[in-house]
Amino acid sequence: MTKQKLKKILLGKELSDGVIFKAIVYVLLIAIGFVYLYPILYMISYSFKSPTDIIDPMLNWIPRRLYFDNYLRSAKVLNYFPTLGMSLLVTLLPAILQTAVTSLIGYGFAKYNFRGKKIWLMLVLSTFIVPVQVYMIPRYVMFNKFGLLDSPFSVILPALFAQGVNSAIFILVFYQFFRMIPHSFNEAAELDGAGPYQIFFRIAVPLAAPAYITCFLFGFVWYWNETYLLSLFLPGYPHLQLKLASFVSAYSSLYSEDIIKLNEGIRLSATLLIIIPMLIVYLIMQRWFVEGVEKTGITGE
């Protein structure tokens, strides 16, 4: 093999075609993937370990047998399935409502011209700049006046009126996405006799599938991990995140006389039980996200 051929194999016609470049990319991807996956793999491994496996210095990753008692204990302490249903009520429903409402607002800003449009858009986006703590106190006073504290409506109603968690970001995402849809689509639909709502639901919504999926996933994760609003507006509401915060004391009171004390395996199994709903939603929506990206090849001019 000549030096020229060897150089062509190692470096390629272009730098990105060579074996060396691809090897470096794969090494970096594996290293970054390991950094992200290591905590999850560690949690999965330890959550299935028995107390004897945890204290065994000769046992690192694979337990001698799958020990499901950690999950049973964690689920009992968390009151898992009833609490999961209540958690989804203040997570899934606000995420859906917020995505739907912000898409309407973003579409209005993208496709219609009206007096003061730029000012209104700036005001909407400025709500993202203002710290949450600034308007949480007035909102708390208002909810207290209307008797909405400790009620799921204290989280659902703001999402319904595009005042949920980071709604301004979703409005901006939909605004930018709907701007990419050619106006010729709207004009052709109008010539066929379609009204504004028909154009929105039959043309804009299908084309904006990736934006809907992205905003919904972000909204779901943000609401799921939102402990500040829950502790402020729903202090007595059963939510898995709040249950996890008091997991140590709850376990100690429930299993005070048990021979098996709280250990790392039980803690990590409780953490995984709270992560599982998000993973399931991601796995389900991933397929729709890929299909949505494929369908948007006709957007733009």
Image (cartoon, grey):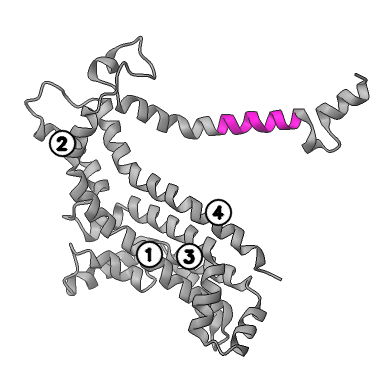
Please tell me the numbered disc located at residue 290.
4
Task: Give the Cα separation between the discs numbered 4 and 3.
Answer: 20 Å
Q: Residue under label 1, please give it.
A: 96
Q: Please, what is the three-letter code of the amino acid marked with disc 4?
A: Val
Q: Position of residue 168 (x, y in %)?
A: 46, 67
Mark 1 and 4 residues: CB-CB less than 8 Å, in contact? no
Observer-nearest residue: 70 or 39? 70
Quadrant in the picture for the N terminus: top right
- Magenta stretch secondary structure, dominant: helix
Viewer-closest of 18 and 143: 18
Q: Secondary structure at mark 3?
A: helix
The disc placed on residue 170 is 3
The amino acid beneath tag 1 is Ile
Where does label 2 land, which residue?
Answer: 249
Magenta span covers which residues? 20-32
- Mark 3 belongs to which amino acid? Phe
